[in-house]
Image (cartoon, rainbow, N blue to C red):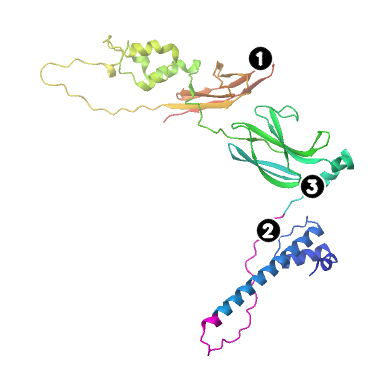
Amino acid sequence: MTAQDLSKMTKDELFEVAKDKGLFITKKMKKGEIIEAILDKEKQDEKERKRKEELLKKSETKQVSSQPASVVAPTQAPPSRIPGPYVPQLPKEYGKDRLLLLVRDPHWVFAYWELTEKSIQKIRKKIGEETFKRSTIILRMHDVTDIVFNGTNSHASWDIDVNTRLGTRHINVWGTDRNYLAELGYRTPSGTFIRALLSNTISVPRGKVSDRIDENWMIVEETYKELLEASGMQKIGASSAEVPSLAIRHVPGELKGLEMALASEAVSSWGSQALVREKPKKGRPQQKKEEIKLLVNTDLVLYGYASLGCEVTVASNKIKVNPDGTFSVRFALKDGVHKLDVEAKKQGISDIKRIPIEVRRKTG
């Protein structure tokens, strides 16, 4: 079936022909695209038929040469062509304007784009026929880390000549741990850029091991006393080296002196019978009473991100913010409801962002 024969058919008739040949055709495809797909399929079928015939001839020649001279190989009719399983082909385009970025690794991103003829005609009409013919399709990459992109405020940008309205490309980015987006458009001879498509924003991961070792520890002031009571420290009359180390770990910096006093053996009076150290009696050795010890605690890690230069507070307590805007604090919680409202404010800006957080712990 020739291209001329196919062009005389209606789109519905072409759709049926393509369906009989096992082609995946959508109704959005144009008539010329359907004809091109049918012709390509016929060429593939013809090549496959010739390949199988050549293999068959080689096989017959090998069989005849391997038989004695007195034996004449019987003639065999070529087997009927058996079509193999059909594998649907992805369409070359989808008829939609789109520019998509995907992260491959910390140093490379993948770009896919499709610019429809309708959008191209709009740009042609906007800049004029002569300027359009001399313009180049480019992909403009932008570093938009920690900013809201408005078209001109990126940290850095660079152009990639692609000269095609439909394509893919692997792009080597400048730095790791950054945010990027792309624009597709026309660059005129005067250097003016006419944007046609805007991509999504992607975050390229860090290209090395994180330099953040552990979260910051913090105890909310309103729960400070309750945590000391939960640790059992309020039962101690003076000091003890036997105070559980877990309770000491949760004591903030202002109690470092108390921690040192707890390690002292100088005081022998105790406020809790469970911690009284009796002197061994003379005579027979003292037998130690076996008991089961169990200590359970719960920590909560709160982390997030704020714009650079912001001051962040959690439950009205100022916390440390890393140079990249991230923060992380750890809380030791006892049973009950804990309000850990997070606020961010910046000098010179009246707006204050606030996120209320309420955590409930229940043991048993």
Q: Determine whether the residue tagged by mark 3 lies in a helix, strand or loop.
A: loop
Amino acid type of disc 3? Thr
Q: Earlier in the sequence, mark 2 or mark 1?
A: 2
Quarter holding the C terminus?
top left
Amino acid type of disc 1? Gln
Quarter holding the N terminus?
bottom right
Residue 64 drawn in magenta: yes
- At x 71% / y 37%, what residue is drawn? 182
- Give the residues drawn in magenta, as a range: 63-91
Q: Provide residue 179's location: percent of width, then percent of height.
A: 64, 32
Q: Provide residue 161's location: percent of width, then percent of height.
A: 74, 40
Q: Is residue 85 left or right of residue 237?
A: right
Q: Residues within 10 Å of mark 2 (few under 14, many from 20)?
A: few
**Farthest left residue in view:** 283
Q: Provide residue 190's location: percent of width, then percent of height.
A: 83, 33
In this orientation, which residue lies closer to the viewer: 210 or 60? Answer: 60
Q: Determine whether the residue tagged by mark 2 lies in a helix, strand or loop.
A: loop
Q: Determine whether the residue tagged by mark 1 lies in a helix, strand or loop.
A: loop
Q: How many marks?
A: 3
Circle 3 is placed at which residue position?
116
Q: CA distance from mark 2 to mark 3?
A: 21 Å
Query: Marks 3 and 1: in contact by CB < 8 Å?
Result: no
Circle 1 is placed at which residue position?
347
Residue 197 visible at all: no
Circle 2 is placed at which residue position?
89
Identify whether 16 is placed above or below 358.
below
Query: Marks 1 and 2: in contact by CB < 8 Å?
Result: no
Identify whether 87 is placed above or below 69.
above
